[in-house]
Image (tube, helix red, strand yellow):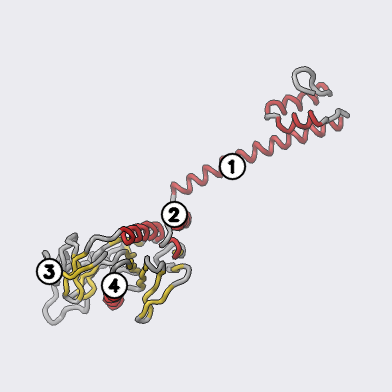
């Protein structure tokens, strides 16, 4: 989302927000507060970076669509022990409480029962400045987030923060820890590819309802194959009997055999076997 500096609204004091973690004596504070210990009131549309409060403005259409598509893809791609989220506040340090556009984090809580830190963070860049996004990324990287990405929808590029700078990626994001398969970058930019990416992810997960549908299709295919094989066998039997019985298979008769249904073919085989001649009035000769 776009951000603008604004006076604080219902801000929590550091360490006193919506967290069940025990207080720490002055002078013995940990380097970082728990990630789910708040400075700002959740759902208040505010962030804090380095003690400065920013109001989270509503997104423009391109930013909103890109973020929705990103969430759609991430939710399908994550392994069962991970979750994907959007606009979730993370306590980056004592003076920063920020909400990445999208992230991937472990489902399992910490020993103290709190949320674990994100493994992957994604920021969508539209009208917001690169400098603002980069500063948030620096905070999250320092906090310990493993990988951070920026999706620039104007330049149609995806980059990763590596060793203090943005590095443009070319084809996929591979992350076996979090994803069931590599994330195709094209899917983040085009709706049709997003659907394909999600479908492939659900196949990789062997989603039960999808597997059931596939299995039903396989069974129907097997039955169609069996019927097709039986029909082919009946036609071959008719041809063999005509050859043995010295019955002419004229073009008209071959056309009949080729287009006859199973019932007609079985009746024809019975006629040839029992009467040793081509049927009369009841079937064209």
Asked which secondary structure carries label 3, the reply is loop
Q: Nearer the viewer, mark 1 or mark 3?
A: 3
Q: Residue at 22% across / 63% down in the picture? A: 57
The quarter holding residue 114 reads: bottom left
User: Where is mark 3, residue-wise?
Assistant: 7
**In the rendering, at what x and y percent does residue 182 appear?**
46, 65
Q: Residue at 21% across / 79% down in the picture? A: 31
**In the rendering, at what x and y percent does residue 65 appear?**
34, 58
Asked which secondary structure carries label 4, the reply is loop
- The mark found on residue 221 in the picture is 1
Q: Residue at 48% across / 48% down in the picture? A: 211
Is disc 4 in contact with disc 3, using a CB cutoff of under 8 Å?
A: no
**In the rendering, at what x and y percent does residue 209 appear?**
44, 46
Number of other residues with Cα within 10 Å of mark 1, as a class: few under 14, some 14 to 19, many 20 or more: few
Between discs 4 and 2, the one toward the N terminus = 4
Give the CA separation, mark 2 to mark 1: 25 Å
Between discs 4 and 3, the one toward the N terminus = 3
Q: Nearer the viewer, mark 4 or mark 2?
A: 4
Give the CA separation, mark 4 to mark 2: 30 Å
Between discs 3 and 2, the one toward the N terminus = 3
User: Where is mark 2, residue-wise?
Assistant: 195
Is disc 4 in contact with disc 2, using a CB cutoff of under 8 Å?
A: no
Number of other residues with Cα within 10 Å of mark 2, as a class: few under 14, some 14 to 19, many 20 or more: some
Give the CA separation, mark 1 to mark 3: 65 Å
User: Where is mark 4, residue-wise?
Assistant: 129
Give the CA separation, mark 4 to mark 3: 20 Å
Asked which secondary structure carries label 1, the reply is helix
Between discs 1 and 3, the one toward the N terminus = 3
Q: Is residue 197 above or below residue 227?
A: below
């Amino acid at each position: 989302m776009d951000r603008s500096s604004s006076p604080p609204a219902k801000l929590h004091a550091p360490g006193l927000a919506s967290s069940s973690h025990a207080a720490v004596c002055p002078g013995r504070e940990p380097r970082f507060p728990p990630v789910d210990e708040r400075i700002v009131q959740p759902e208040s549309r505010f962030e804090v970076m380095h003690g400065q409060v920013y109001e989270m403005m509503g997104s423009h259409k391109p930013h909103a669509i890109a973020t929705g598509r990103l969430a759609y893809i991430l939710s399908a791609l994550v392994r069962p022990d991970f979750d994907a989220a959007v606009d979730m506040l993370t306590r980056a340090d004592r003076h920063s409480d920020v909400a990445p556009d999208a992230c991937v984090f472990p489902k399992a809580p910490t020993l103290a029962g709190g949320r674990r830190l994100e493994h992957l963070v994604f920021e969508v860049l539209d009208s917001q400045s690169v400098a603002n996004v980069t500063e948030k990324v620096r905070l999250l990287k320092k906090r310990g987030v493993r990988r951070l990405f920026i999706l620039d929808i104007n330049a149609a590029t995806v980059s990763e923060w590596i060793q203090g700078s943005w590095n443009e990626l070319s084809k996929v994001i591979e992350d076996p820890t979090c994803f069931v398969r590599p994330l195709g970058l094209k899917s983040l930019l085009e709706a049709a590819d997003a659907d394909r990416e999600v479908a492939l992810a659900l196949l990789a997960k062997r989603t039960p309802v999808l597997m059931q549908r596939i299995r039903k299709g396989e069974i129907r295919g097997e039955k169609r194959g069996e019927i097709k094989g039986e029909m082919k066998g009946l036609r071959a039997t008719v041809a063999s009997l005509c050859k043995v019985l010295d019955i002419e298979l004229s073009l008209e008769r071959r056309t009949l055999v080729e287009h006859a249904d199973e019932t007609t073919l079985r009746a024809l085989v019975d006629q040839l076997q029992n009467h040793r001649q081509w049927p009369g009035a009841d079937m064209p000769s």
